[in-house]
Every structure is written in structure tokens, then in C-alpha cells.
Amino acid sequence: MRADSSPLLSCKSLRVSVPGRLLVDELELSLCRGEFIAVLGRNGAGKSLTLQTLAGLRRPELGGVLLGLADIFGCRRQHIARQLALLPQVIDDIFAASALDTALVGRHPHIDRFRWESAEDYRIAREALQTMGLAELAERDILTLSGGERRRLAIAQVLTQTPDIYLLDEPTNHLDPQHQLDAMRVFRRAADDGAGVIATLHDVNLAVRFANRCLLLFGDGRWQLGPCEDVLSERGLSELFRTPMESVTWHTHRLFVAGGP
């Protein structure tokens, strides 16, 4: 992380709730250039809603979100989209389109009204497809892609957006082990090159391998944020997931597995 950089995205006293349930209370978070924050928690703990709130798509019950120094809820959506990309957990395709045209959607925030995509826009989109191993599928109809191919295309689309901030909701959904690692390496490199990344994950060990810090959401308002080596423990993860978690040593890494009978 670049310690001398001001936050790309931050929140203060953020409260996220749904009717009858407080999910996250008084969250304080700052995302700086070079940083990868993994968000962990069981199903229904508020990970997706927190990500949507940080993206300015859902107002918090209390608190605020800053994009740089500006209140994100006072910014135009095009301005936000030029700096911040959100990868949703689920994407529904209704109409046929090529993989290349779908990736090009990521360029729309950068294209002024009444202007078509430029050669540079196409180059960026094709480079993103190449990064995700989809170059040969550029002309394929997205309705014919497998679930894993479609997920990689969604990642290629946010890469085409070239933002400073990536908010990723379960980016490894539908991906086999090789493509999970490939996708995580892409975003780790993006952070190393100066972007900021926040990703919700279900695999603790991906957080161990790729994140600088972890945000644990317990689903009852409580949260814990800190360096992975400080936050991730057998006791804490067992409480987080409500199942016994045990640590094992693999090469130089400490990994976690679900224990018990």
C-alpha cells in the first residue's frame, strides 16, 4: 500500500441495515492506492449491501461515503463510473451480444455523448479479453457462453472500464481453481499498479494469499478490520462462519479449513 496516498474511497460511521435487522454499524474504512481489502462473512451478513453502499447505489441508514474528497451521493453517475467499477454477484443476460461488445460497455463512462467507440476503446477491450483468456471468444454470442466464461467476461468488462477502484462481489463465482487464481492475480496486479480493490469472498485462503487487509462482517452490526495476519484466526473465523475453523501450514502460508467431525 502507498502510505503517502490519500484514500480513493472511504466511509465514516456507516450503518447498513435491512428491515428489522442491523447488519453493519459504525463502519470506518479507507481504501488507498495499492491496497486489496477482502470482505468475509457468512451468507446474509451484509457483504453485498455494504459493497453497493460503498458504490453509491444504496444510501446508508447513517454515515457517509467519500469518493476521494467528494460525497459519493452528490456525484454524477458518469463521474463515479470513470473512477469506480462494481462487479455484481449476479448478471442476467437478456439480449444477444458479442463478447467484445459486452466488454466495450466498460468504456461507456469514458465516451462523451454522440461519440462512438474509438480504436483505443477497442484496443482496451480486446486487451481485457486477452487478460481473461477470452480473446478467441470475442465474436461469440454471450448467450452461448458457459457460466465460468460469462464470469470471466464480466471481469473483462470492469477491466475495460479502467477505474482506480474495483468493488468486486464474489469475483470467483463459477470459476474453476485455475481461473479463480488467474482472476485474483489480475486484481492483485491492479492494486500493485496503483488501483484500490475491495472484494467479497467466501474462500478465506484466497484472502490470505492476495489481500492486504480483511474486513470481517458478523451480520449483527459488528465488524473487524485489520491486516490479514492479525484479523484471521481460528477463533475469529469460527465465530464468523459459525463452524469450527482450523489453521494448517502450507509452504509459507497459513491456510484455514473447516474442521469438526
Image: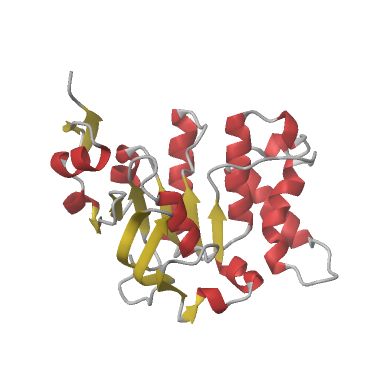
Query: Relative to the observer, which residue lies in front, 20 or 32?
Result: 20
136 above or below 120?
Answer: above
Image quadrant occupied by the C terminus:
top left
253 above or below 126?
Answer: above
- Which residue is pictured at 46% across the width and 50% down the height? 48
- Which residue is pictured at 73% across the width and 41% down the height? 99
Residue 53 at x, y percent in the picture: 47, 62
Residue 164 at x, y percent in the picture: 51, 66
- Which residue is pictured at 61% across the width and 68% down the height? 82
Residue 85 at x, y percent in the picture: 56, 59
Query: Relative to the observer, which residue lies in front, 258 or 177?
Result: 258
Q: Is residue 86 left or right of residue 188?
A: right
- Which residue is pictured at 18% across the width and 31% down the height? 244
Residue 40 at x, y percent in the picture: 33, 46
Would residue 188 be seen by someone viewing this image from the given angle? no
4 above or below 129?
Answer: below
Q: Is residue 201 left or right of residue 75?
A: left
Query: Relative to the observer, which residue lies in front, 201 or 210?
Result: 201
